[in-house]
Image (cartoon, grey):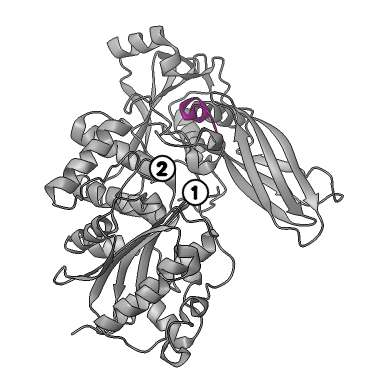
Amino acid sequence: MKRLFTIGGSLILMTIITAAIPAADMTAAITKNQLRQNIEKILSRDDVASATVGVCILAGDTGDILYEKNGEVPLKPASCNKLQVTAAALHFLGPDYTYKTSLQITGKIRNKTLVGDVIVSGSGDPSISGRFGKDKSDNTAIFRDWAKALKRMGIEKIEGNIVGDDDYFGDDTFGQGWSPNSRGSWFSAEVSALSFNDNCVDVVWSGNGAVGKTAPYKLNPPTSYVKITNEVRIGKKGTDKTSSFHRKDKSNEIVARGMIPKGGTMSDSAAVYNPTHYFVSVLKETLEKERIPVMGKAIDLDDEPVLKKALQEDPPTTTVATYESPRLIVLLDTVNTNSQNLFAELILKTIGKKIKGEGTFLASSEAVMEFLRKEKLWDNGSLIIDGSGLSHLNRASAHQLACVLRYMSRQPWWKDVLGTMPRGQMKGYLKKCFGESAESREIGKRIYGKTGNISGVIGLSGVVYNENNREIFYSVLINNYRGSTQRGREIGDAIAFEAARSRLP
C-alpha cells in the first residue's frame, strides 16, 4: 500500500540560507533577535514573494511569541490539520482506545453448513490490512483467521450471504472540497465504518518486457472486485517511475497510467468505490480460497433494505470472532508519520460518533471545533471540514496550530505524540533532512514536524528542542505557492532548523 510521499536525497538547507548567513555560522547557536532576522531572510526568497505565508513560533514554557508573520491569518493547513485531530482524539478517546470489528452469523448450522448469513459489523477500524502484521503485504491474514474461526464452529459451507454493516458512520464517504479527479488515488480513499486495506487495491508492476510495451502487473489482494485498464509502459533503464489512477464516481473500472524502467518494479494503491462492498467481496473470496464455499453474495447492507430491517428487528446473537485494532496512539503514528488520510478521517468520524452520536463529516468536525474553542485554541476564521486536511476548504492559522502543539505538550500523553511525528535524521519525511554536516545532523535530531502538502499549499508544524533544551513550537503555512514541492518544503525545514539552533535566555 502506498501511503507516504518521499523525496529522494537530502534537503540542502545550505542553499536556502547561505546567502543570508555566513557558512561558518550555519550551526552556531543564535539569539532571539538573530532568529527573527534569519527567518526574515529565509522568507525573502523570490519564490515566496507571490505566496501567502503564515509563521508562528512560540516559547513552550511561557507561550510568548518569538516570531510571527501573518500568524493569525486563516490559511489552508493541508495535512498539518491532522495535528488538530490528533489532539481531539487523544482528549476524547485516550491513547489506549481500540476499535472492534465483529464477525457474526444468523440462522442454524446443519451438517457443517451455515443456513444463514455471515454479518461483519464495522466501527471505523482503519487497521484491517497487512500494515500491522508480520508480513505487510499479507492483507487478508485477518480474513483467514476468521475462516479458521468459522471452521472451529463446524462451518464448512455457507448457504447465505456475506453482509457488511457500515451503519456506525454516516454515508458521506467523500469529503467536501476533495477533487473528484482524484477518486482513484489512495489519498482520496472513500470513508466507511467497514474499511479494508486502506480502501485500496494494491497494484504491483514488473519492468520485465520490451521497452514501449505494457508492463505486466498483479493485484494485491488478487480480487475481481475492480477492473484495471493498464496503460503503464516499460521505459528504458533509468526512466523515472510514475503512476496514477483514474476512476469515475460509483465505478470500479480503473485506468492506470505511468512508466516503469526496464527491469524495475513499482507499486501503487488505487482507491475503490464502495469500501464496504469491497470488504465483504474480498472476505468472500478469501473464505472460498480457504475451502469454505459461499452460495450467496457479498452484500453491502445498505443495498438490501428488507434484510436490513430484518436484522434490526432480530439482530444476530452468535459472534464467531472479534478483531481488535492496535491502540489509538499506534494508529496515530500512521496518521502523522505516513500522513495517511483515511486513518485521519476514520478517527475524526469516531470522535463525532462518540461525542455527537453521529459519525458524519459535519458532526465530527463540529466536535473537534468545539473542543478547540473550549480549550481556547481557536482563531477567528478557522474552519475544519475533514480530518486529513485534503479539503481546500479547511482553514487554520499558524498561531492556532502552534498553540495546539503547546496544548498537547501539557498533557500526560505528550511523549507518545512526539513518537508519532517525523523527526530530523530519525523518522518519516524529516529523516532525510538536515544531513549537511555532523553538527546539522545533531541539530536535526531535535526537530519534530508534521508536513502538509496539497496543490499550492505547503506546511510544516511541530516542536524543536533548542540549544538550551527549551521547547519551541512552530508552524509554517504557505498558500498560493507556485514553486516545486521540494523547494516549498525547504522553507519550513529551514525555519525549524533556525528555531532548533536558537539559544533563549
Quadrant containing the C terminus in the rendered view? bottom left
Q: Secondary structure at mark 1?
A: loop
**Residue extent of the magenta highlight:** 271-279
Report if residue 103 lies within the magenta region: no
Residue that badge 2 annotates: 392
Closer to the camera in the image, 364 or 49? 49
Closer to the camera in the image, 81 or 70? 70
Q: Where does the image place residue 287, in percent across and percent down from the top left?
A: 55, 29
Point 17% across, 41% down: residue: 370
Q: CA distance from mark 1 to mark 2?
A: 9 Å
* Looking at the image, residue 406 lies above or below residue 205: below
Amino acid type of the residue tagged 2 in the rendering? His
* Looking at the image, residue 237 lies above or below residue 446: above
Amino acid type of the residue tagged 1 in the rendering? Ser
* Contact (Cβ within 8 Å) of mark 1 with mark 2: yes
Residue that badge 1 annotates: 455
Residue 52: quarter of image: bottom left
The answer to whether one can see residue 366 in this image is yes
Q: Where does the image place residue 267, in percent across and percent down from the top left?
A: 64, 49
Point 36% across, 54% down: residue: 80
Residue 170: quarter of image: top left
